[in-house]
Image (spheres, grey):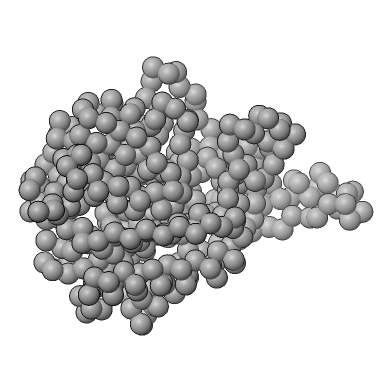
């Protein structure tokens, strides 16, 4: 008989520093003013385009974002730097991503009434790894004192849902008893803070999810994982070309495409129907009525996008209890966004109620995890 996998607990690490829209705009506009003055002659000749200022109102209207947590505020808000400034650590020290992941993991272990000895598989699923190897997951495994095995995976903003699906398969096949899946995201590291259209999008955070079977769970309040559905469809509309081959063409390694770039309008137009149809098909496949579906923990990228997706799924406007929002405080945290929403707004469901953890992003990639309150 096949085992039933569950999410027994989650963890959340939030950096101590936060940047408001107003603070971000003040830095960006100072950079714009200095750039336009420096290049005034070329701008007047038509050889360069003058940069346009931003505003807190524009950011909130375009995205729903009001603030974001970051690992380093000072560097980002310095118009001469406009990037997080982190001290490079020796190879004998825990990496920044490992440190964040461990803090989220420790919270999940405590909530799940577990110790590191109870875990035998670790997945680090995130958009950007601090290094190619050794795997971040193996470092996290060592830092926590976990036996078994560990590996990294990257499916951009869908990394967490793809990680959950991978963990479910491991639990059901008996290749692991309990899986720790963590999502450390230092999104500020790959964000172009000099780009008016995207400088406000991302924040930093780490989340953790523990997946095990109903046979081993030690807590009373958990979610049964009913079904998982994953979709990928190639697109260049969200892209980051940073990588180890950049050194083979040094003349372009500082170009804007070595940071996050996207065609926002195309993404909105193409991803909304892709995700809406995926969710509706997944719900129908599992014979779930709309009356049974109580919560949508959606990827936290854009408020308008989430509102439209939830409306297409539910057939009406969703309220904040049905489709919780955390991007106003956290901004887009890539793979961690839907897990933050699940962590902070997982209460209030009755036994038998259904919810969906949903991701979507670069790839395109999309994941749907149907859960049922125990």
> Which residue is at the front of the view, 59 or 74?
59
Check the image and name the residue furthest to the right. 45
- Residue depicted at x 37% and y 73%: 310
Image check: 198 left or right of 321? Answer: right
Residue at the outermost front position: 1
Describe residue 276's horizontal placement relative to residue 245 as left or right. left
Residue 308, quarter of picture = bottom left
Residue 335's x, y, as percent?
Answer: 40, 50
Name the image quarter holding the C terminus.
Answer: bottom left
The picture places residue 273, in percent across and down from the top left corner, at 47, 72
Q: Position of residue 236 (x, y in %)?
A: 59, 55
Above or below 99: residue 263 = below
Q: Is residue 260 above or below residue 246?
A: below
Q: Nearer the viewer, residue 157 or 10?
A: 157
Q: Left or right? Give the position of 344 relative to 241.
A: left
Q: Residue at x 9, y 45 (%)?
A: 216
Question: From this viewpoint, is residue 240 visible?
Answer: yes
Residue at the spot 20% in from the left edge and 34% down from the top edge: 120
Could you tell me how many numbered marks the image carries? 0
Q: Residue 209's spot in the image, x, y percent?
A: 26, 47
């Amino acid at each position: 008989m096949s085992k039933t996998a569950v999410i027994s607990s989650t963890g959340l690490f939030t950096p101590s520093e936060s940047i408001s829209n107003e603070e971000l705009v003040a830095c960006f506009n100072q950079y714009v003013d200095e750039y336009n003055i420096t290049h005034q002659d070329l701008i007047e000749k038509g050889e360069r385009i003058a940069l346009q200022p931003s505003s807190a109102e524009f950011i909130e209207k375009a995205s729903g974002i009001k603030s974001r947590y970051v690992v380093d505020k000072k560097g980002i808000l310095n118009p001469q730097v406009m990037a997080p400034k982190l001290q490079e650590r020796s190879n004998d020290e825990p990496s920044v991503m490992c440190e964040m992941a461990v803090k989220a993991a420790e919270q999940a272990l405590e909530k799940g009434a577990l110790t590191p000895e109870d875990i035998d598989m670790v997945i680090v699923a995130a958009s950007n790894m601090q290094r190619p190897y050794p795997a971040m997951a193996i470092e996290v495994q060592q830092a926590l004192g976990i036996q078994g095995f560990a590996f990294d995976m990257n499916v951009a903003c869908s990394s967490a849902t793809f990680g959950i699906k991978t963990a479910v398969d491991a639990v059901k096949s008996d290749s692991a008893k309990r899986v720790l899946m963590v999502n450390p995201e230092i999104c500020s590291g790959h964000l172009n803070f000099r780009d008016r259209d995207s400088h406000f999008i991302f924040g930093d955070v780490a989340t953790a999810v523990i997946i095990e079977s109903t046979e081993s769970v030690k807590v009373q309040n958990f979610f049964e994982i009913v079904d998982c559905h994953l979709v990928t469809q190639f697109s260049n509309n969200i892209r980051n070309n940073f990588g180890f081959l950049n050194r083979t063409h040094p003349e372009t390694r500082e170009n804007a495409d070595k940071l996050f770039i996207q065609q926002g309008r195309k993404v909105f137009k193409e991803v909304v129907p892709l995700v809406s149809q995926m969710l509706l098909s997944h719900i129908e496949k599992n014979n779930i009525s709309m009356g049974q579906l109580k919560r949508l923990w959606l990827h936290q990228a854009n408020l308008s996008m989430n509102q439209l997706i939830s409306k297409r799924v539910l057939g009406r406007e969703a309220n904040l209890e049905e489709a919780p929002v955390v991007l106003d405080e956290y901004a887009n945290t890539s793979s961690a966004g839907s897990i933050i929403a699940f962590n902070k707004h997982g209460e209030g469901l009755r036994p038998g109620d259904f919810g969906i953890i949903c991701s979507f992003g670069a790839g395109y990639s999309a994941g749907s995890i149907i859960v049922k309150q125990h």
